[in-house]
Amino acid sequence: MDISARKQTEERLLKTKEAAEAANVAKSRFLATMSHEIRTPMNGILGMAQLLLIPNLTEQERLDYARTILSSGQSLLKLLNDILDYSKIEAGKLQLERLPFSPERLIYEVRALFVESARDKGLEFEARWLGRAGQDYQADAHRLRQMLANLVGNAIKFTERGRVRLEAEEVERQGGWAVLEFAVTDTGIGIPADTQARLFQPFSQADDSITRRHGGTGLHARPKGWCGVFGAKAVRCCA
C-alpha cells in the first residue's frame, strides 16, 4: 500500500503542533519578561512618589524626584504603546498614514532624543540627512520616528564604547514615489550571523542573557508595507 500521502499529512500535523508549542513557549517567556520590564518603571514611579511625601524636602530634591517620575512614566508609556502596536499588527488593523514630513527634520529630532544618553556613555553620536536639503516627502512620520527611536536606543544600549551613526538618504525614485533608506550603525556587540534571521520574529532575542544584562522585551513589530534589512530600514515615500 502507498501511504506517502498519509505520511506527508502526519508530518505537516507534527510541524504544525511543534510550531504552536514553540509559539506558546515564546509568548510565556515574553509575558515573564514584559512583567519585569513594566515593574521597573512602576517601581520608579511609586518610589519617587513616596519620597515626595517626605516633609522638609529641598526644592532640588523635589525636582529630581519629579524628573524620575516623568522619565519612568515615559518608559512605561513606550512599553504599553509597543504592545498595543503589535496587537494591532497581528489583528491587521494598523493603518499607516501618508502625511508630509521632512526627513532632515526627523533625523534632527531623533538625534535630540538620544544625544544626552550617548554622551553619558561617552559615545560619539552622528546623525545626518544625506539627501537634498529642504526635500519633503509623504509617509507615516510617526511610525518612522518610532522605528528609528527603537533602533538608535538599542544601538546605544548595546554599545559600550565607540560611536553610533544614524544616516538617511534617497536611494531610488520612480515617478511620484521615492525609496528612502535609514541606516543605524554602531560599534557595539553586534548580532551573530546565525541569529540575525530571528530579528523580525516576535518575542525573540538572540541571547536570553541579553535580557538580564541590558533589558528589553524581545518584541519586534513591523507594520505591513515597511521593508527591513539588518541594521537599516527602507521606506517607500511619496515624493
Image (tube, grey):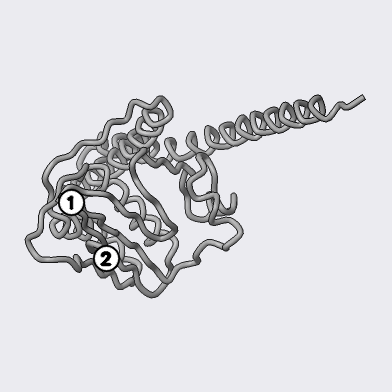
Instruction: Name which residue lies at 26% across and 58% down.
Output: 114
Which label is found at residue 230?
none
Q: Give percent across and percent down for residue 25.
A: 63, 33
10 or 127: which is nearer to us?
10
Residue for point 30% across, 73% down: 124
Quadrant position of the N terminus in the picture: top right
Q: Amino acid at mark 2?
A: Glu
Q: Which residue is at the far front? A: 1
Q: Earlier in the sequence, mark 2 or mark 1?
A: 1
* Closer to the eye: label 2 or 1: 2
- In the picture provided, is 12 more to the left or to the right than 209? right
**For residue 80, above or below residue 138:** above
Q: The residue tagged with tag 1: helix, strand or loop?
A: helix
- SS under mark 2: strand
Q: Residue at x 9, y 65 (%)?
A: 133
User: Residue 107's image quarter?
Assistant: bottom left
Asked if the residues shown at circle 2 and circle 1 are in contact, with their CB atoms under 8 angstroms apart, the answer is no
Residue indicated by mark 2: 167
**Residue ID at (38%, 27%):** 92
**Marks 2 and 1, how far apart at CA:** 38 Å
Where 93 sits versus 26, above or below? above
Q: Using the image as rendered, state which of residue 54 and residue 235 is in the foreground.
A: 235
Query: What residue is pinned by disc 1?
Result: 60
